[in-house]
Image (cartoon, grey):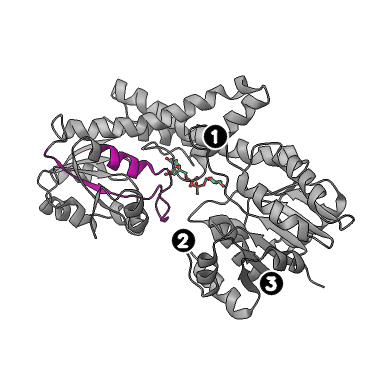
Amino acid sequence: MPIRLTVIGTGYLGITHAACMADLGFEVLGLDIDADKIRRLQNGELPIHEEGLEPLLRRGLESGRLRFTTSYEEVAAFGDVHFMCLGTPQKKGEYAADVSQLDDAVEALAPHLGRECLVVGKSTVPVGTAERLAAKIQRLAPAGAGAELAWNPEFLREGFAVQDTLEPDRIVIGVRSQKAEQTLREVYRPLGEVPMVVTDFATAELVKSAANAFLATKISFINAMAEVCEAAHADVQQLATALSYDDRIGGRFLNAGLGFGGGCLPKDIRAFMARAGELGADQALTFLREVDAINMRRRARMVDLARELAGGSFHGCTVGVLGAAFKPNSDDIRDSPALDVAATIGQQGGLVSVYDPIALDNARKAHPELSYATSAAEAARGANVVLLLTEWNEFVQLDPEELGAVVATRKIVDGRNALDPARWRAAGWHYRALGRP
Ligand code: UDX
């Protein structure tokens, strides 16, 4: 009998994992407690924007290999391997992660696990969670059924989720038995030769926290250099290019600008610090406080630069904002630096008009107080200052002459170092950027 998979939780990670696994030939049953979402998924409707995912979803549904349900009983009866892809958001008012969705899922699933199976955690969690959940499964599953836990962190990037799932850099699995290792090797066999690190629960959980901490640190490092460049009248873009020729440093994740946002990096470094504190190792991660602070200072600096160009105050000033998503090619606005800046300028009296190619619906729900436009030109119409806050290709391609014709004054702040300063200055724009003279 081929291995049958279930995916519990249908967020960015869960839907992608379910659709990719079905495309690899597995029978997959996806579960969510949101009945409306399940109905839409079963109709081939994606609740998120993710490059290349919709055809996979449709193909899975049409082949009958991919189905969705809200019933834990059905999932338990169906699956040999259950992937838990639940969210672990930041707790309100504290740094720690809220892992209650995982606990709830285990509590709902375990009592139905009447046969041998492997439960696999994919969520990003505070180290120690897997051990605790394993004990919970042991306690709640019917005696002698043989339900086991493994931890298999996911490293996918939004916008590249399908590609990262089908062609991962590495697979990390934390296991307590050879059997669990064999099962996961079998599941990932269709991906071909992928480096695999087989380890214990704690190390597997920590790899993910460490990877995100490293990426966040790299971004904040270059943004710290941008602060120094601003003070010294130097150019962080040229500095980064020069650094990138050193193989040991590399050029990726070295784009200075408005900094990192999204549903992962900001909350994951905070949860990592909180967990290290609980373990008595808080000193080891105090540098992440600085990483976080540098990142947040970029947003404040962006507001200051915009205010400076607006003549010292936003009152009576029209500000055209290009970008709402936390990064291009995504409709995700969770902890979006762009929206954070737009909202702050609105609070300080600016008349803000925001445009984003696909994140507008989400932005409108989160910030109904802002105005929204249906094109870049409309957002910029009559603007005293234009801000580029998410580097969509559409914005990078903008013609400075055409945009110049609709604004009140040709002033732009490039929050992502995505535009060619010479081109914009040649078209008569007052061009400013983060980290550049
Ligand atoms: C991240 C990790 O990359 C991924 O491995 C993990 O599984 C989840 O978190 P994601 O949140 O999708 O993925 O976005 P990513 O592409 O990493 O970008 C994060 C943020 O950093 C974005 O706001 C982006 O604009 C910003 N960024 C990225 C920079 O400011 N500079 C850079 O050089 C790179």
Q: Which mark is residue 48?
A: 2
Residue for badge 3:
25
* Ligand 1 closer than 8 Å to label 1 CB: no
Q: Please name the amino acid that badge 2 sits on.
A: Ile
Q: Please name the amino acid that badge 3 sits on.
A: Gly
Magenta-colored span: 316-345
Circle 2 crowding by C-alpha within 10 Å: few under 14, some 14–19, many from 20: some
Instruction: Give the CA separation, mark 1 to mark 3.
Output: 36 Å
Q: Secondary structure at mark 1?
A: helix
Q: In the image, is 348 to the left or to the right of 326?
A: left
Residue 229 position by quadrant: top left
Q: In the image, is 196 to the left or to the right of 270?
A: right
Query: Contact (CB < 8 A) between labels 1 and 2?
Result: no
Chain-order first, disc 3 or disc 2: 3
Instruction: Give the CA separation, mark 3 to mark 2.
Output: 23 Å
Which quadrant of the figure contains the C terminus? Answer: top left
